[in-house]
Amino acid sequence: MNPKEILFSRPVAVFQVFRNISIYEKAEKSFDNRRDKSEWNKISSKSGHVINDELYLPEQIISNPDLLTCDLITIEDDNVPNPKGDYNRCLHLARNNKFDIFEIKKKDDIELHLKYGYFEVGIPRRENFKLGEIKRNKPIEIKINGKTDSSLTSRRARVYKEQAYIFEYIGDFDKCKILREPYDSTVKHVPAERKVIDLIKQLW
């Protein structure tokens, strides 16, 4: 059976996003103790892919009310399997451009901006600023870390968070094909050639 095909109202940019978030306590502050968490793995993905210039997205995307009118669709994969499952987002960049700890803005090019939050990033505080432009076939990786108390009103142990995101602009598409279960996962590797913006700070 041929997969169902959905037409967009206009060409939509598609980003592949790889995400690696590691949360640890002081006992793991040595990088050697958490090296395996920081290194990128081969990823078994069911969140969508492009084959022969055709975009394939999982069936759950149909329930997104912005699917047919959005500017940007994300294909998101976590380095460590996410118990909630990987997911996709449909963004209108003029009014709905928040993506985790970032804002994605459309000007002459598509721009990636840091959107700082204490609980999302931790201290030391960073100012919000433009990280760079995301262009076709020029992946960009952002690395950032911070420390937070589990609650501002309690005395629970301090935790540390190290985050890495890779954004890859894989193309513009005017339609997609829908993947219905059961379907095979796709093996993905993070792009070897990428620009790295390193915002890692010494935390001790």
Image (spheres, rainbow, N blue to C red):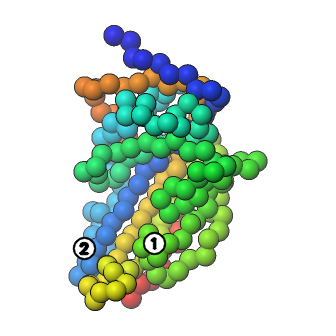
Amino acid at dot 2: Asn
Residue 73 can be seen in this image = no
In the displayed structure, 76 sits above or below 154; it is above
Q: Residue furthest top?
A: 1
Residue 82 image point, x, y percent: 29, 51
In the depicted view, which residue is nearer to us: 30 or 112? 112
Q: Earlier in the sequence, mark 2 or mark 1?
A: 2
Kindly report which numbered mark, 2 or 1, lies closer to the viewer in this rendering. 1
In the displayed structure, 148 sits above or below 46; it is below
Number of numbered discs: 2
Dot 1 crowding, Cα within 10 Å, few <14, some 14–19, many 20+ = many
Residue 34 can be seen in this image = yes
Quarter that holds the N terminus: top left
Residue 71 image point, x, y percent: 61, 39
Q: Residue at x 45, y 72 (%)?
A: 121
Q: Is residue 126 left or right of residue 17?
A: right
Gap in angstroms between the C-alphas marked 2 and 1: 21 Å
Q: Residue furthest right?
A: 108
Residue 141 image point, x, y percent: 51, 57
- Residue 33's label in the rendered image is 2
Q: Secondary structure at mark 2?
A: helix
In the depicted view, which residue is nearer to us: 138 or 84? 84
Q: Are marks 2 and 1 in contact (CB under 8 Å)?
A: no
Q: Is residue 82 left or right of residue 196?
A: left
Amino acid at dot 1: Val
- Residue 121's label in the rendered image is 1
